[in-house]
Image (cartoon, rainbow, N blue to C red):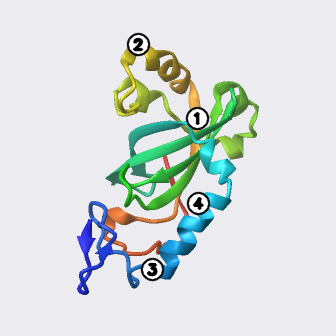
């Protein structure tokens, strides 16, 4: 954790990005956050039950790749939704959202929609798609399923180019 000029803690920048602009949190904000944590359920977030790490390429610039950390909520056997961060530590920045569907659902999509989705086959078979801290024997069936899945990813924050805030002239889709 970095310290700001007044000595209070500030967010550690992710790889490639500078510090996020803004003042350190006040004691009042910390109290509000702790109170909310005790009183609110945060049910959708608590449904995230899997962490996946992979690398992604920008579809418009294949020379750029970034490490991504997906926090996965499985809505059913054929549909997952992921909050995607640039790191897996407490300073992680939400850089996008990915929806993942089974091959069965993908094949039911119209051709124009299919063009916006990417296969996970290469990521999984090349070893780029990993389930951190999960023994291989436990994770192997999930990897086999993921190799047959398709994702649609919206990137909202290009931290690899040093953006301190989410600044995009368009939403970028990885593939």
Position of residue 151 measured from the top left corner of the image (x, y, whole percent): 57, 40
Classify 10 Å Cα crowding around label 1: few (below 14), some (14-19), many (20 and above): many
Q: Nearer the viewer, residue 123 or 79?
A: 79
Q: Earlier in the sequence, mark 1 or mark 2?
A: 2
Question: Which residue is tagged 1?
Answer: 150
Q: Is residue 93 left or right of residue 34?
A: left
Of the numbered discs 1 and 4, the one sitting upstream in the chain is 4
Crowd rating for badge 4 (residues with CA inside 10 Å; few <14, some 14–19, many 20+): few
Q: Is residue 69 above or below residue 104?
A: below
Instruction: Kindly identify which residue carries mark 2.
Output: 137
Residue mark closest to the camera, 2 vs 3: 3
Circle 3 Cα neighbour tier, 10 Å, few/some/many (<14 / 14–19 / ≥20): few
Which residue does the numbered mark 3 point to in the structure image? 27
In this image, 90 relative to 146: left or right? left
Which residue is denoted by mark 4 in the rendering? 37
Of the two numbered discs 1 and 2 in the rendering, the one whose residue sits closer to the viewer: 2
Marks 4/2: CA distance?
Answer: 36 Å
* Corner quadrant of residue 76: top right
Most extreme residue toward the top is: 137
Residue 105 screen position, x and y as percent: 72, 31
Separation (CA) of disc 1 from disc 4: 34 Å
Distance, label 2 to label 3, CA atoms, is 46 Å
Q: Residue at x 48, y 73 (%)?
A: 30
CA distance separating discs 4 and 3: 15 Å
Residue beneath the point at 34% across and 69% down: 11
User: What secondary structure is found at the residue carrying circle 2?
Assistant: helix
């Amino acid at each position: 954790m970095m310290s700001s000029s007044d000595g209070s803690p500030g967010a550690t920048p992710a790889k490639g990005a500078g510090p996020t602009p803004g003042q350190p949190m006040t004691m009042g904000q910390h109290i509000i956050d702790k109170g909310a944590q005790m009183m609110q359920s945060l049910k959708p977030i608590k449904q995230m039950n899997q962490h996946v790490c992979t690398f992604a390429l920008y579809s418009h610039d294949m020379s750029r790749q970034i490490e991504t950390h997906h926090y996965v909520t499985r809505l059913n056997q054929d549909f997952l939704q992921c909050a995607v961060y640039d790191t897996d530590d407490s300073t992680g920045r939400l850089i996008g959202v990915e929806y993942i569907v089974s091959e069965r659902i993908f094949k039911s999509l119209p051709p124009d929609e299919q063009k916006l989705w990417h296969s996970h086959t290469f990521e999984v078979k090349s070893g780029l798609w990993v389930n951190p801290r999960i023994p291989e024997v436990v994770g192997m069936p999930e990897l086999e399923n993921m190799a047959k899945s398709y994702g649609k990813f919206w990137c909202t924050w290009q931290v690899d180019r040093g953006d301190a805030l989410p600044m995009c002239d368009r939403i970028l889709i990885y593939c």
